[in-house]
């Protein structure tokens, strides 16, 4: 390109909702780049969304933009192109002559214009955000960046000389330390290509001498040698070059000059792992749906993407998976600079059909395939662009999907491809041309994720299993019975009902091929999804076109139940539980030696699909105060210490055994590592030690030592901390362990315990006695099941899906809010939020619904409900009745008595009830209790 004319600024504007066509004169103006919503053009949107953010000035239809541009004499007659970086469907007119249309939703719209005469010309662009050739996935959804209309990013006229380079492709050859430059020379004669390279973002600089190549019109390739001291690109050392390409004619005049960013690297799939420049790496991925609540569209400036990706990297992330979308080029450039492995995805979430199938849409299929080629052509030179997926949770013809993979690989073999993300959910199959597999299971019971929706049961280990650090997915990825030649049952064949997008659908489950032992890297898809309660203080941050009307409605619902004063506590306590769930989930992934990586859903809140507040960052990528980046990196980083032990709760004097290992994909680690470990209580050291271990080169999973500690004898419940660290590094980890005094016998001996509010119980209360009412959980109807883990993704969305599939709905609760200063916890000290001493207790309980009770009657321990239902849920509540006092807890005391934490809890209840501190403030009537406990 020789020069350009910037077209940013004021444009004439006309909205055309009903496609009537352009009516002159224009009646409004707008500043571009931007969107009609961001500029607040058109009628105000009266619809209020509960399931997502509300676009205050949503406009769907056709929008006409026009402006005049002056062409100076020196540019008259030159080859000219209109470049629009990011938009929707466009049609272009030049001086009232239609030039053509473009329909890419992911890549720039480039129009070749007739050679322009000097003087003033009128450019008119019509942008449609309706009638897309495909549904668009997260590119056009109200759940994510909204269905905006406008033009974002660069807008310019580009002028070229008599010769120009097009379709430039840069390809690394790590072995030879060269870059292959392939391009099309658009020229009438031979010319000279001068190539030079200069590193620009690393401490060590490297300049490569210019070299000239004679090139002929048409397609050509040249190999440019960078030299054996060339700098390599990776996540740990993202060294980049500016490669300058200069075309010169026979007289040495420059006819075209282009600068491209290049990183010399080799990203491959080898066995069950990915490698970067020959070294194994582990993908610590994040889902991204292009959520930008301040604008409603994705930024196109590098600085903003450096900020966004930099925040993720501070939380240990090295990989981004874009859900049914591709980001603008600025995102790839920022990822190049920061060392992030990028995976865009075709904008499709549906079924790939054969021509003979019902509902086959060949035009849509052709469009999707062309969009993939456009993405590869536009962004494939970026070293960060290493992977691509064909869509999200696709169904349909596996043969057709595999043929798409084959064609893409033939077109561009620089990156790795997968058939899609979690395709054929229940009956997946690795296809012939898959380079890696992204999913959540290989069959009904071969799960390699920690949590699932109820409609997608069985649930995961974080949701159902006793908390421990023993879990890994190695036996699920490669089961021992398959290695021994045994056949596993699967659900292939016939029809099955599945979650399909945000709804339910019945699909045909084709017979799988039996390819059940993966021979390629396996990435766990959308792991996590642990929800927290909304932070209503966030509402004021939505000062752009998108408004948090959903948050306002959730707040009103909570206030209508008389619980508004607890909103901040709900947010904090549910958030702490979510963090603990993420830690358990991520540790299982790092313990899994056959896993190649994961893709979190999510580090960041998701604004739509019912409002899924699953992040430790809000939708703005700001911290929610749940955990610091430094602490998060202790269990999500390129090196993670892991102590493997079966439980968190121990009896006084019990042996504690743990195997300590290190998951390490960090370059430059020393040959010898020194582990320091400590077991502390109240800042006092109970036991400590060090262990040295030699690390052979290329070792990623290091077994360090076995700890064998006799836990101290205690006369009260104590919290102990196991701390691990690798000396001389930032690698550390800590675990809380709880130790209980040895107790035997009936913890409730001497206490009046009833499972019903019987006449005997009422008589004792009338006599001024203290009574513990422990209804059997299975007998209660006005109650919610005890469930330790927080809600999955978003209760309203998955409640609806479960109901439509006639499956159990989620429990929907989000942990405990504990009045931990209450004297009932004298022997059972607790945080305000759920911690592992509560796991067995909660799992064998129900929480009583107190919606109709007097609002001044508040539980001592409250179960936090979701923002749709907002039940006032009592796990533990007290009151005075008649002359006596009553404590109510719907708990299976026999089952929890089998655990030291359960016995300690019951002992604490008993101790409180016989103490002078048992003086409930609320006085209940018998009728109130009978209405409540049923």
Image (tube, rainbow, N blue to C red):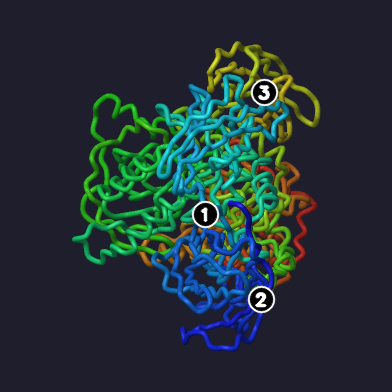
Q: Label 1, label 2: how many angstroms apart (C-alpha)?
A: 42 Å
Q: Quadrant of residue 200?
A: top right
| 74 with respect to 128 (left or right) | right
Q: Which residue is mark 2?
A: 30
Q: Which residue is mark 1?
A: 792
Q: Helix or strand or loop: what does disc 1 sit on?
A: loop
Q: Label 3, label 2: how many angstroms apart (C-alpha)?
A: 70 Å
The image shows residue 647, relative to residue 615, as above or below, that is: above
Q: Quadrant of residue 416?
A: top left
Mark 1 vs mark 2, foreground winner is 2
Q: Are marks 3 and 2 in contact (CB under 8 Å)?
A: no
Q: Which residue is mark 3?
A: 711
Q: Label 3, label 1: how many angstroms apart (C-alpha)?
A: 36 Å
Q: Residues within 10 Å of mark 3 (few under 14, many from 20)?
A: some
Give residue 656's position: percent from left, percent from top: 61, 23
Q: Residue furthest front?
A: 251
Return the residue nearer the eye: 431 or 240: 240
The image shows residue 399, relative to residue 348, as above or below, that is: above
Q: Helix or strand or loop: what does disc 3 sit on?
A: loop
- Taking the spot 63% from the left edge, 83% from the top edge, the residue there is 44
């Amino acid at each position: 390109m020789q020069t350009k004319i910037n077209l940013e600024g004021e444009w004439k504007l006309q909205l055309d909702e009903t496609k009537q066509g352009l009516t002159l004169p224009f009646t409004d103006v707008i500043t571009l780049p931007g969107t009609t919503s961001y500029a607040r053009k058109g009628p105000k949107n009266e619809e209020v969304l509960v399931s997502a953010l509300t676009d205050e000035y949503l406009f769907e239809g056709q929008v006409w933009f026009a402006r005049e541009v002056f062409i100076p004499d020196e540019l008259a007659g030159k080859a000219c192109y209109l470049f629009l970086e990011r938009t929707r469907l466009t049609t272009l007119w030049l001086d009232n002559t239609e030039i053509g249309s473009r329909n890419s939703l992911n890549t720039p719209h480039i129009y070749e214009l007739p050679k322009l005469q000097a003087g003033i010309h009128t450019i008119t662009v019509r942008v449609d955000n309706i009638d897309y050739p495909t549904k668009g996935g997260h590119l056009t959804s109200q759940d994510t960046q909204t269905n905006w209309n406008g033009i974002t990013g660069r807008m310019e006229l580009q002028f070229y000389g008599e010769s120009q380079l097009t379709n430039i492709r840069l390809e690394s050859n790590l072995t030879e330390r060269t870059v292959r430059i392939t391009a099309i020379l658009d020229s009438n004669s031979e010319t000279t290509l001068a190539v030079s390279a200069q590193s620009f973002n690393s401490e060590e600089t490297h300049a490569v001498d210019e070299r000239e190549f004679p090139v002929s019109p048409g397609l050509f390739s040249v190999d440019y040698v960078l030299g054996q001291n060339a700098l390599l690109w990776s996540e740990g050392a993202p060294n980049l070059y500016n490669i300058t390409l200069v075309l010169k004619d026979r007289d040495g005049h420059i006819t075209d000059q282009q600068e491209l960013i290049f990183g010399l690297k080799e990203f491959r799939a080898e066995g069950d792992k990915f490698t970067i420049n020959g070294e194994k790496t582990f993908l610590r991925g994040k889902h991204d749906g292009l959520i930008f609540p301040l604008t409603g569209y994705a930024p196109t400036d590098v600085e903003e993407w450096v900020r966004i990706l930099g925040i993720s990297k501070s939380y240990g992330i090295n990989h981004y998976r874009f859900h049914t979308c591709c980001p603008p080029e600025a995102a790839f450039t920022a990822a190049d600079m920061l060392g992030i492995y990028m995976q865009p995805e075709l904008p499709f979430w549906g079924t790939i059909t054969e021509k003979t199938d019902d509902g086959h849409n060949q035009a849509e299929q052709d469009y999707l395939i062309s969009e993939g080629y456009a993405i590869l052509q536009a962004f494939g030179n970026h070293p960060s662009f290493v992977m691509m997926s064909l869509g999200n949770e696709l169904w349909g013809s596996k043969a057709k999907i595999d043929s798409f993979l084959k064609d893409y690989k033939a077109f561009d073999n620089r990156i790795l491809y997968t058939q899609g993300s979690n395709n054929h959910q229940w009956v997946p199959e690795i296809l012939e041309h898959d380079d890696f597999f992204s999913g959540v299971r290989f069959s009904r019971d071969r799960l390699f994720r920690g949590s699932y929706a109820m409609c997608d049961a069985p649930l995961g280990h974080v949701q159902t299993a006793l908390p421990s650090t023993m879990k890994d997915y190695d036996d699920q990825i490669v089961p021992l019975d398959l290695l021994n030649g045994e056949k596993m049952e699967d659900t292939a064949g016939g029809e099955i009902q599945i979650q399909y997008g945000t709804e339910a659908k019945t699909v045909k489950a084709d017979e799988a091929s039996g390819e059940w032992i993966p021979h390629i890297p396996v990435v766990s898809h959308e792991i996590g999804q642990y929800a927290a309660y909304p932070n209503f203080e966030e509402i004021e941050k939505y000062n752009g076109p998108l408004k948090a009307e959903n948050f306002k409605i959730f707040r009103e619902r909570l206030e209508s139940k008389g619980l508004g004063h607890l909103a901040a506590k709900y947010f904090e306590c549910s958030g702490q539980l979510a963090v603990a769930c993420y830690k358990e989930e991520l540790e299982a992934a790092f313990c899994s030696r056959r896993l190649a990586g994961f893709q979190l859903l999510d580090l960041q809140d998701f604004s739509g699909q019912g409002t899924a507040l699953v992040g430790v960052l809000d939708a703005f990528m700001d911290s929610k105060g749940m955990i610091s980046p430094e602490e998060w990196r202790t269990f999500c980083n390129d090196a993670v210490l892991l102590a493997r032990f079966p439980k968190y709760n121990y009896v006084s004097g019990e042996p504690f055994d743990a195997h300590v290992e290190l998951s390490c994909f960090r370059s430059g680690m020393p040959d010898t590592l020194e582990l320091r470990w400590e077991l502390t209580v109240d800042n006092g050291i109970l036991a400590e030690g060090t262990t040295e271990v030699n690390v052979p080169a290329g070792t990623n999973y290091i077994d360090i030592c076995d700890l064998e500690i006799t836990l101290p004898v205690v006369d009260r419940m104590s919290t102990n901390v196991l701390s691990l660290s690798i000396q001389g590094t930032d690698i550390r980890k800590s675990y809380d362990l709880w130790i209980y005094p040895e107790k035997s016998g009936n913890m409730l001996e001497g206490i009046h315990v009833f499972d019903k509010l019987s006449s005997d119980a009422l008589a004792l209360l009338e006599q001024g006695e203290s009574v513990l009412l422990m209804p059997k959980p299975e007998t209660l109807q006005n109650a919610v099941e005890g469930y330790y883990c927080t809600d999955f993704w978003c209760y309203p969305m998955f409640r609806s899906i479960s109901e439509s599939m006639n499956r159990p709905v989620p429990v929907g609760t989000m942990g405990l809010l504990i009045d931990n200063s209450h004297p009932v916890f004298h022997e059972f000290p607790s945080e305000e939020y759920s911690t592992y001493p509560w796991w067995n207790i909660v799992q064998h309980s129900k929480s009583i619904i107190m919606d109709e009770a007097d609002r001044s009657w508040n539980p001592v321990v409250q179960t936090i409900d979701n923002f749709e239902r907002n039940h006032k849920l009592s796990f533990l509540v007290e009151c005075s009745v008649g002359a006596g006092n009553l404590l109510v807890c719907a708990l299976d005391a026999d089952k929890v008595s089998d655990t030291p934490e359960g016995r300690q809890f019951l002992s604490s209840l008993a101790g409180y009830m016989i103490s002078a501190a048992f003086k409930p403030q609320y006085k209940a009537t018998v009728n109130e209790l009978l209405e409540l406990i049923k």
